[in-house]
Amino acid sequence: MGRGKIVIRRIDNSTSRQVTFSKRRKGLIKKAKELAILCDAEVGLVIFSSTGKLYEFSNTRYLTIYSPLHCSPQFWQREAAILRQQLHNLHENHRQLMGEQLYGLGVKDLQKLENQLEMSLKGIRMKKEQILTDEIRELREKGALIHQENLELYKKVNFLWQENMGLYKLYTRDADAANANCVNSHGFNTGENSHISIHLQLSQPEQENHEAIPKTSK
């Protein structure tokens, strides 16, 4: 029968907590050793108990600074002195790269510095050319895309123009037909002899013949 699932929370009982810490600490260190051996990995393990006691495991010398020997004030003073010297060297190297404080340098040192600057300048130029090339390619792609969009718009405009011309012709033909029907309805000849001029003449009203009417006697 398997063990039940343990709830991960702080153990209230101090005795049980200490026993659990001791067992799990040993198991964790054992797993770290196995991992380092089986996988050829650099493993560093640091454990502090609730009372501040240190337990550690490391299979590489770069991870042993947490040992009690390296926690002394003298160790950290040496580490601080080393870091200050490294920072000073970096500042001095930077000033020399900027062409400052070149006194005390020999021909070999100056030649080395010059080669370093040339290599740096070469890398900067290569990076700049790469950026410019990428920007040019991007602009060409955008130009080709805009050109394609212009062609599509031109096709649409041409299609709309042809469609409008067709509608205009249809409207003109219908208007001519309507005018012809209007003329025919009023009795005008619009056939082959429509070019013959039509003469209209108004008849004169007849004058009253007063003489023909006999006079009545009074």
Image (cartoon, rainbow, N blue to C red):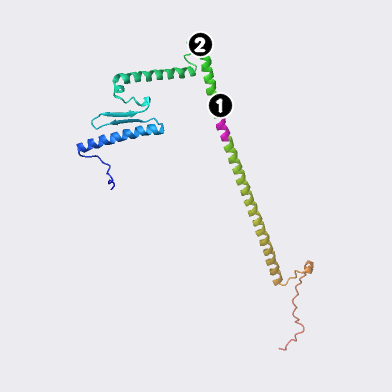
Image mark count: 2
Does 114 appear in magenta?
no
Locate residue 91: give its quadrant: top left
Task: Please give the name of the residue rendered at 53% of the width and 15% of the height, measured from the top-left corner.
Answer: 111
- Give the residues in magenta: 128-135
Q: Is residue 108 above or below residue 130?
A: above
Q: Is residue 201 above or below residue 148?
A: below
Question: Mark 1 packing: few (<14 Cα in 10 Å), some, or many (20+)?
Answer: few
Secondary structure under tag 2 reads loop
Task: Please give the name of the residue rendered at 30% of the width and 18% of the height, measured from the top-left corner.
Answer: 74
**Can you identify the residue that label 1 sits on?**
125
Percent across and percent down for residue 59 are 36, 28
201 lies left or right of 143: right
Q: Is residue 206 above or below residue 77?
A: below
**Can you identify the residue that label 2 sits on?**
106
Secondary structure under tag 1 reads helix
Q: Choose between 108 and 70: the one closer to the eye.
A: 70
